[in-house]
Amino acid sequence: MPNPRYVPKLYAVEPKLFGKRQPIHWRQADTLLGSEIDNLAAARFQHEVAFKARRAIHFAGVTFEDVADEHGVEAAWIGRILRGDTVMSLQAVAWLDRVFGIGALRVTSLQVGGQTGRASDESNPN
């Protein structure tokens, strides 16, 4: 079972670029053992979601604080998951997809709220 307490950005060769640039370089899977390979895959997915969310925030001309205030979450939480300081939950992925329409759930055929990959529920991801 993968460790949910790993730090996703530490799987990037340059952790400070996590969620901020595309493409970035990653640690090589052949240098990792066991569940670390799964952590690498999850970190890469989180980076993709974070990058798309950051881009949406930028193009909307808003800040993490603006988003947090509008949706009843903590700006610090948004920052932590988008920087890769902490693992992004699946609920957070769904929330980011709903709020920013970034297509994060399109990798599945999940139907939520009548739309593939888009939830209509306004629940808080925390």
Image (cartoon, helix red, strand yellow):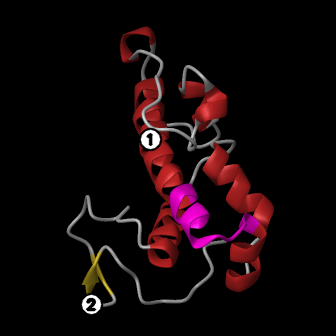
- Mark 2 is surrounded, within 10 Å at the Cα level, by few (under 14), some (14 to 19) or many (20 or more) other residues, namely few
Specify the amino acid type for callout 2: Gly
Q: Position of residue 30 (x, y in %)?
A: 36, 11
Q: Is residue 87 shown left or right of residue 51?
A: right
Does residue 37 sit above or below 47 in this rendering? Answer: above
Mark 1 to mark 2: distance in Å? Answer: 27 Å
Q: Is residue 59 magenta?
A: yes
Residue 42: tell me if it is visible.
yes
Q: Position of residue 119 (x, y in %)?
A: 40, 82
Q: Is residue 89 magenta?
A: no
47 or 4, which lies in front? Answer: 47
Q: Which residue is mark 2?
A: 114
Question: Pointer 1 and pointer 2: residues touching (CB < 8 Å)?
Answer: no
* Quadrant location of the C terminus in the rendered image: bottom right
Q: Which residues are magenta?
A: 54-64
Q: Position of residue 84 (x, y in %)?
A: 63, 42
Residue 6 placement: quadrant? top right
The residue at the point 34 percent across, 65 percent down is 105
Sequence-wise, which precedes: disc 1 or disc 2?
1
